[in-house]
Amino acid sequence: MANEIPDLEAIARTGTGKGAARQARRDGMVPGVVYGGGQDPLAIQIPFNVLLKRLKQGRFLSTLFNLKVEGQEDVRVICRDVQRDVVKDLPTHLDLMRLRRTSKINLFIPVEFINEEAAPGIKRGGMLTVVRPEVELVVTAGDIPEKITVDLTGLNIGDVVTISSVDLPSGARPTIDRDFVIANISAPAGLASSDNEDGDEAEAEDAAEE
């Protein structure tokens, strides 16, 4: 389970409709609605600057939040839509969906690499090249993994780590069907150059012998 699900604080809106939404925007808020989870929709508003900061951090639509609204029980939500001004491209409304513990959602899970000291390729000077520092998985809301662990033990220069070679948490699966690359052990520039020179010399010797 992930150690920390970020809080998203909001304020309940007393009015609904276009007039109330316009008033919220005039007050420096972004109106929104929370729906799903077998409960009635809840009209909310979030300070514009707070929401804009969250959006700039990225992954807003694929991040699970702990929604805190005064007078309401905390609930886990995921954003399903952010409407934006067509001219200024700034948020004007958002839709949040409540999640049950059994709900399936797409989230980006960070990748942790362990046992670099046990990788012969890295001992020889090879570089760990991380292609995907995080992987998007379909996970259960009540059992979100903190991370994916990749064991580098035994990997040599030229070896590639793909998603199929990683033990994923129970109940989790990648959103991409193909066997994509997560990382590889690449040769250091000096070694690569040396290998090329050796190959060139060998070809020259073979040519001379012929």
Image (cartoon, helix red, strand yellow):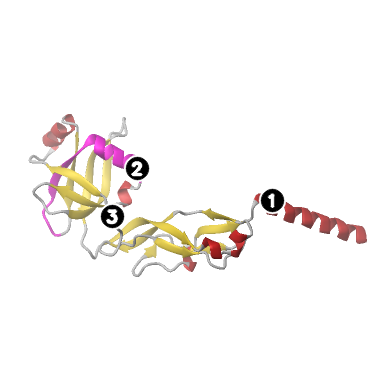
Q: Amino acid at mark 1?
A: Gly
The mark closer to the camera, 2 or 1, is: 1
Taking 37 as reference, is 49 left or right? right
- Hey, what amino acid is under mark 3? Glu
| Mark 2–mark 1 distance (CA, rounded to whole Å) | 38 Å
- The residue wearing badge 1 is 190
Residue 143 percent location from the top left of the image: 28, 65
- Count neighbours of disc 1 (C-alpha within 10 A) and say few if under 14, some if 14 to 19, many if 20 or more: few
The reply to whether discs 2 and 1 touch (Cβ–Cβ < 8 Å) is: no
Left or right of 41, for residue 85 = right
- Comes first in the chain, label 2 or label 1: 2
Whole-angstrom CA distance, mark 3 to mark 1, is 43 Å
Q: Secondary structure at mark 3?
A: loop
* Quarter of the image where the N terminus is located: bottom left
Is 182 in front, or is 93?
182
Bounds of the magenta segment: 38-58
> Is 97 above or below relative to 171?
above
Q: Per the image, is 51 magenta?
A: yes
Q: Position of residue 70 (x, y in %)?
A: 11, 46
Pointer 3 residue = 4
Residue depth check, mark 3 versus mark 2: number of the one nearer the observer: 3
Q: CA distance from mark 3 to mark 2?
A: 16 Å
Label of residue 57 in the image: 2
Label 3 crowd (10 A; few <14 / some 14-19 / many >=20): few
Task: Specify the amino acid type for callout 2.
Answer: Gln
